[in-house]
Image (cartoon, rainbow, N blue to C red):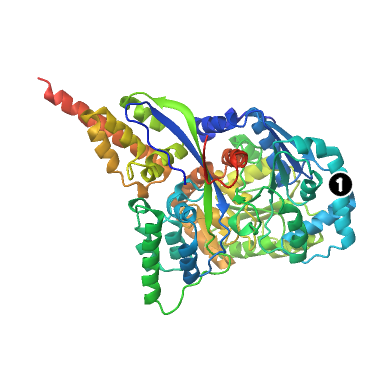
């Protein structure tokens, strides 16, 4: 659904909308082209699906182009992606040739538009070589890394670096994700859309329907972890924590994630989770389709406490979603969860099932405190992690780039 | 850093907006107190300014124990409460320059290092990243024509404008004075109580949103007491 930025006025306040419009005025009419590798599915497409229309609403001529690739190309870029995240991968010279060739054929299609654009934002590694193929470019080029490349496989990063170092600037989601590059590196955290199906307000009837559909007991406190079935999300550790709580307080647990049709490890993890859950009727292991946004929204809203007990995490937008719904979060002490879960304010950071159990018991015994933490959590997200802040930072970056990135302060 | 001089007092108050974008400084992260000290000694003034003064504008949790990033990291990641307390009390706006602030900060850290037998370390993943910010300051086009309208205008300001006019202003001439006080001072004695009240705000304990509320409260309280005094003076 295409929205105007004014749709967010009631959520973030009129001054924030006014500020965005003022910044947008300075960029009115410029052509901004975003390039990524997929039109739907995945976080980048989700971001561009709201960002491009909102930029247009500010009268910026924003465009979104998706590169076309072969299955071989996407196998190579998947390996690059994994290598950048630190997994050992083997990428041959032939693979890099495929990477280059597909970008070359996309450059033929996109060159004229990209060379004329005022700002080009290339998202993630897949289209990174395009800059080198647009020699007559007039505008500023930004490389946006959405993934954690804090400890990349060196050979993979070395090759990719040769493409991205020529950009005018790069953007990373968190400080630790940044790599040393010969241009300014900006930090822009991800965000959530409070009006999306995953985060919008839902009426009680819909919540009740979801509760009924999954056989959840309205009389028992509900703990919810939403994440794919991956060992780094430690779902078995969450079940251990549940057992430690259950000895003292009756609770129910939902572990919900996507169906792991194309991920052999995911299927193995689901098996381990089911085994750990046994026949306990209060543990609900839910495999949801990838578009079950409203169901996830409802489960988060039905929860008393949100858990995200990751041992390794990127930014952790499921934490942001939980906080936005006014729930305290028990989060693993990793990645971006550390930025969001602040002890005694928005939840607790934990390292073990024992730690998680103890903090959850504390919260269940201190209901008033839990409510207060929920209020704080929601305001924290409102101030820092909604798409309006995300858009504002992109506008700021574009203004800085057009004034010369060397400046630390510009007056416009 | 470019300095903007405050406007002459009888002019309308020009509301500026201020947005900030964080960027990496290029300095390596610090894993322990010694490394932190050495990076503070060599970092640019912009880095120092960012970690001491710009934290309220950064997307981060806004109720830290201390207002500067160094004290927060030392408390939470190095577990050195003593040093955190000593650094946490620093008012960066009270120093005439970033260099003086740097010297004072290093003095405190060096003193502490001389007291310690073991250099405190952060766990992997909890290192200190040196960042700086690029800011864009822009004219919102909004003007306040008379002091009586200032409260309403403050109520409608973004936190960026509050930061720019009440905190960042202290670095611009005349130093250590916020833009609101500077402007009100040009309207004579009638507004002196408001200026005094604004000066008494202990801003380091407020988030920007709370600061906006406090500014409104202070201006309203002064107005209320003036009106009460006016009524008493009438026969």
Residue A284, how many percent across, how many down?
A: 68, 54
Residue B72, how many percent across, how many down?
A: 44, 60
Q: Is residue B33 above or below residue A377?
A: below
Mark 1 closeness class: few <14, some 14–19, many ≥20 residues within 10 Å:
some
Q: Is residue B177 above or below residue A240?
A: above
State the residue lying farthest toward the left: B235
Quadrant where the N terminus of chain A is found in the figure: top right
Q: Is residue B140 left or right of residue A152?
A: left
State the residue lying farthest toward the bottom: B117
Which is more toward the observer, B179 or B61? B179
Read off the chain for label 1. A
Which is more toward the observer, B136 or A341? B136
Residue B157 position by quadrant: top left
Residue B90 position by quadrant: bottom left
Residue A377, how many percent across, how many down?
A: 50, 47
Q: Is residue B11 left or right of residue B38?
A: left
Q: Which residue is mark 1?
A: A104
Which is more toward the observer, A153 or A326? A153
The residue shown at (33%, 24%) is B146
**Residue A270 shows in the view:** no
Secondary element type, mark 1: helix
Residue A20, how many percent across, how many down?
A: 56, 33
The residue shown at (50%, 69%) is B35
**Residue A170 shows in the view:** yes
Residue A93 position by quadrant: bottom right
Q: Is residue A129 left or right of residue A405?
A: right
């Amino acid at each position: 659904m295409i929205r105007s930025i004014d749709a967010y006025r009631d959520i973030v306040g009129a001054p924030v909308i006014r500020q965005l419009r003022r910044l947008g005025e300075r960029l009115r009419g410029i052509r901004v082209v975003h390039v990524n590798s997929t039109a739907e599915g995945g976080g980048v497409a989700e971001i561009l699906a709201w960002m491009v229309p909102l930029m247009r609403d500010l009268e910026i001529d924003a465009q979104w182009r998706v590169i076309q690739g072969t299955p071989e190309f996407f196998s190579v870029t998947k390996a690059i992606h994994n290598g950048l995240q630190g997994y050992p991968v083997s990428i041959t010279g032939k693979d890099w040739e495929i990477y280059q060739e597909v970008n070359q054929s996309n450059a033929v299609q996109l060159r004229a538009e990209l060379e004329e654009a005022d700002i080009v934002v290339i998202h993630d590694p897949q289209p990174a070589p395009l800059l080198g193929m647009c020699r007559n470019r007039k505008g500023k080029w930004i490389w946006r890394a959405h993934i954690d490349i804090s400890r990349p496989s060196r050979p993979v990063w070395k090759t990719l670096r040769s493409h991205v170092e020529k950009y005018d600037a790069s953007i990373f989601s968190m400080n630790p994700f940044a790599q040393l590059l010969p241009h300014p590196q900006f930090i822009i955290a991800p965000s959530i859309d409070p009006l999306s199906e995953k985060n919008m307000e839902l009426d009680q009837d819909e919540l009740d329907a979801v509760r009924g559909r999954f056989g959840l007991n309205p009389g028992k406190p509900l703990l919810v972890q939403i994440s794919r079935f991956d060992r780094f999300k430690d779902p078995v550790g969450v079940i251990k924590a549940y057992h430690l709580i259950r000895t003292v307080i009756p609770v129910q647990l939902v572990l919900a994630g996507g169906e792991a049709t194309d991920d052999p490890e995911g299927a193995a993890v689901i098996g381990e989770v089911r085994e750990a859950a046994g026949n306990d009727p209060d543990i609900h292991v839910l495999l949801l389709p990838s578009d079950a946004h409203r169901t996830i929204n409802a489960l988060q809203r039905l929860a008393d406490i949100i858990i995200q007990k990751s041992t390794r995490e990127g930014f952790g937008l499921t934490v942001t979603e939980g906080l936005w719904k006014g729930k305290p979060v028990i989060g693993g002490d990793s990645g971006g969860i550390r930025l969001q879960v602040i002890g005694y304010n928005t939840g607790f950071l934990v390292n073990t099932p024992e730690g998680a159990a103890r903090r959850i018991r504390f919260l269940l015994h201190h209901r008033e405190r839990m409510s207060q933490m929920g209020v704080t959590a929601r305001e924290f997200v409102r101030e820092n992690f909604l798409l309006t802040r995300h858009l504002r930072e992109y506008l700021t970056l574009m203004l800085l780039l057009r004034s010369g990135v060397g400046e630390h302060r510009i007056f416009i | 850093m470019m300095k903007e001089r405050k406007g002459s007092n009888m002019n309308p108050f020009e509301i500026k907006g201020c947005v900030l974008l964080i960027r990496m400084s290029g300095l390596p992260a610090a894993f322990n107190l010694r490394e932190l000290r050495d990076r503070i000694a060599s970092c640019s003034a912009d880095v120092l300014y960012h970690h001491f003064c710009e934290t309220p504008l950064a997307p981060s949790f806004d109720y830290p124990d201390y207002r500067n990033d160094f004290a927060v990291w030392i408390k939470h990641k190095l577990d050195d409460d003593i040093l955190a307390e000593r650094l946490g009390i620093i008012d960066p706006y009270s120093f005439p320059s970033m260099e003086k602030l740097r010297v004072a900060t290093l003095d405190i850290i060096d003193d502490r290092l001389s007291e310690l037998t073991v250099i405190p370390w952060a766990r992997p993943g909890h290192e200190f990243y040196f960042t700086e910010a690029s800011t864009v300051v822009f004219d919102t086009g909004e003007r306040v024509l008379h002091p009586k309208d200032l409260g309403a205008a403050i109520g409608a300001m973004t936190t960026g404008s509050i930061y720019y006019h009440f905190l960042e202003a202290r670095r611009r001439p005349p130093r250590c004075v916020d833009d609101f006080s500077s402007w009100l001072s040009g309207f004579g004695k009638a507004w002196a109580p408001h200026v005094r009240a604004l000066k008494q705000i202990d801003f380091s304990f407020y988030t920007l949103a709370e600061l906006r509320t406090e500014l409104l409260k202070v201006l309203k309280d002064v107005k209320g007491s003036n009106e009460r005094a006016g009524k008493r003076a009438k026969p």
